Amino acid sequence: MTVSHTTPSPVVLAEVTPGRSQPLGATLDANGVNFSVFSEHATHVQLLLFDNYDDLAPTRTIDLDPDHHRSYHFWHCHVSGLKAGQTYAYRMDGPNHTRATGARFNRRKVLLDPYSRANINTLWDRSRAIGPEDNCAYSMRSMVVDLSGYDWEDDEPLRTPLADTVIYEMHVGGLTASPSSGVTHPGTFSAVVEKIPYLKELGVTAVELLPVFDFDERQLLRMGPHGVPLYNYWGYDPFGFFAPHTGYCSNPCQCTHITEFRNMVKALHRAGIEVILDVVFNHTSEGNEHGPTISFRGQANEIYYHLWPQDRRHYMDFTGCGNAINANHPAVAKFIIECLEYWVTEHHVDGFRFDLASELSRGAEGYEMEVPPVLWGIELSGILSDSKIIAEPWDGGGLYQVGRFPGRRWAQWNGPFRDDVRRFVRGDAGLVGTIATRIGGSRDLFGKDGELPTNSINFITCHDGFTLNDLVSYGHKRNSANGESNADGANENFSWNCGVEGPSDSPEIEQLRIRQIKNFAALLLLSRGVPMILAGDEFRNTQGGNNNAYCQNNPITWLDWDQAEKETEVRHFFQGMIGLRKRHRSLRDPHFFTGRHNDRGLPDVTWHGTKLEQPGWEDTGARVLSFTLAGFGEEPDLHVILNMFHLGLDFELPHIPGRPWHRVADTAQDSPLDLLAPGSEERVHGRTYHAHGRSIVILTALPDHGGTL
């Protein structure tokens, strides 16, 4: 990106011409900048130009004449002589019969460009954007960006098949905000680059970044205990959908947003790691009728949001955040699809995870649509055809679409996988049939309409809930630091504290917790579908039992890299399991089991219990399951034992002539015997294997070069 790092020249004498309506936003050309903004019902639009990003008032105000600067619903002009780095904003006026029309025009409010590629917030005061008063001296501003001139060095999206993908969900700021991270610019896009060697060694193939669209990190949510202010940390409250978050830039005042983000993407791609963005198109930072006016509310409130038809002053809320985007209005659908295509074409992003994606299935009056235009538009976009598209298939209004999300292409967060595996590992009885279904790719959810296991994003933990360490350390949430009297966050976590609530000095408790973490990791990476790991789970990161740390920009959520150096046993196990998954196609086959046989006569899967071919589907007290996976071609067969009973049990092993079983993994063993490297597998003698209580065992059948079993 090429930008001006000096103050733009005054533009008093610049020529203003009608310009063009498309594309929307601020588009730089050889002679200046074309500006275009959407508003169907505005009667008066002003373009504000600032010589300096922190000027309290505009240097020049350009009134857009509707006879010359309006085409249908688009207001536009071209201003000659402007350069990259130019700061600008809008004011709009129009009808304000809000109860009847929903319009909320206020000519005194300064508005961001929804299509802005970068914003600056040095003067921002959220409280001044609420109410009728002028807020120019306290407003955010948009910045003109030059998208040309960046050297991508032949980079492009990686297009890793979903079946081969291992996702690492992480918060850009929290990854390196701790002083223990040892990076140059903590909490930034640039700092992520410094952690790439770690990510590559771990073996993940994609990072899924919590929201990086510009959001209001200064939004004071409430005062926490002891008077500690709590702010928006996760970023699930955007206002700048085309703009990288200002707070993740090391030098935003110099308009380095685009360059820093692109540098991060390019470096990750060099390491073979894809970039998936967690995107929030279900609501915005403007909130309900008591919220601030930032952009959409002051430009086309009646179009961008779901409003109650009886009194359009009030917002429908299917998100729990005050408003809900009216995504299937043609203008809004255009905005969403163009935004996604922009991140792919200009930033080489590999895919998107849609927060509360079911909200995007709703029509103007809030009802579920059978064929939602915006979802099908995303699915059918040629530009997005190679991008990963992942839905969180529910919303805050009760619409739950796991396994029935519109369109067959969408992958979906598999909430039942999370809950069923949590219950099974903690020792709940009668789940063996359900667990077999989850291991096989959740055919019950995704097999009915021609979908595949790769439609299932399998996860045990994510940003929303307990970390994996806390899942085995706490029976109850500990959210008092959030200032909501521990009323927020899920009450049912299907967790088990292994006998002691919270931290423990008992070696036995610690050993059991480590074993349970390994059990979770093994099940996640043995299952068909797309595994997702929460950042820090691989080294027992803790949030002290907080299962809703959305407002904790502090050590509660920052990854502790000293812990990563200390807790190597679990990290090595995760690393080894990812490697095992990559070596065995049977673990990541993109299809459901069909019963086809390999050249040794072994079906693709055979289910067992402690006795061969007796899985005990009807046993309501069963806590054990084992299965044999056939290897095809040169790939060896695998046999997996799951013993979630608290006592050790003997499991019969199938006989494969000339291929004795060798132990690859046993979560009951201490490191390094818990997971053995290729070539060091230990031969198993006898026709049974004793699996310790609460353990998982993985065996592989290798050719016998020294006799038979």
Image (cartoon, rainbow, N blue to C red):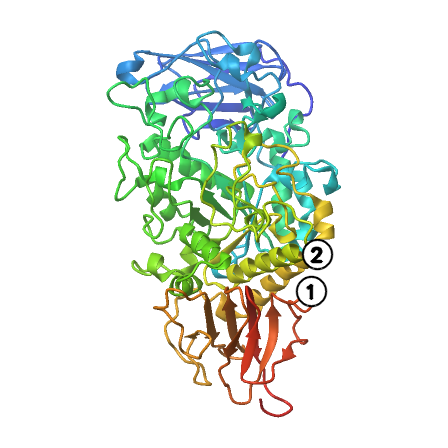
Please state, as top left, top right, bottom left or bottom right, where the N terminus lies in the image. top right
Q: Is residue 332 left or right of residue 34?
A: left
* Residue depicted at x 70% and y 66%: 672
For the point 68% across and 69% down, the residue is 673
The residue labelled by disc 2 is 568
Q: Which residue is more in the foreground, 540 or 403?
A: 540
Asked where in the image residue 512 lies, by quadrant, the reply is: bottom right
Q: Is residue 336 above or below residue 598?
A: above
How many other residues sit within 10 Å of disc 1, few (<14), some (14-19) or many (≥20)?
Answer: some
Please tell me whether mark 1 sits on a helix, a strand or a loop: loop
Above or below, comparing residue 105 to residue 694 in the picture: above
Residue at the spot 36% in from the left edge and 21% down from the top edge: 301
Instruction: Name the residue type under label 1.
Output: Ser
User: What percent of the width, then of the height, locates residue 362?
Assistant: 30, 36
Q: Decide: few, some or many residues near mark 2? Use Cα within 10 Å; few <14, some 14-19, many ≥20.
A: some
Spatial separation of the CA atoms under disc 2 and disc 1: 9 Å
Contact between marks 2 and 1 (CB within 8 A): the answer is: yes
Residue matched to label 1:
671
Which quadrant of the figure has residue 658? bottom right
Q: Position of residue 506 (x, y in %)?
A: 68, 53
Residue 217: x and y, percent? Answer: 57, 27
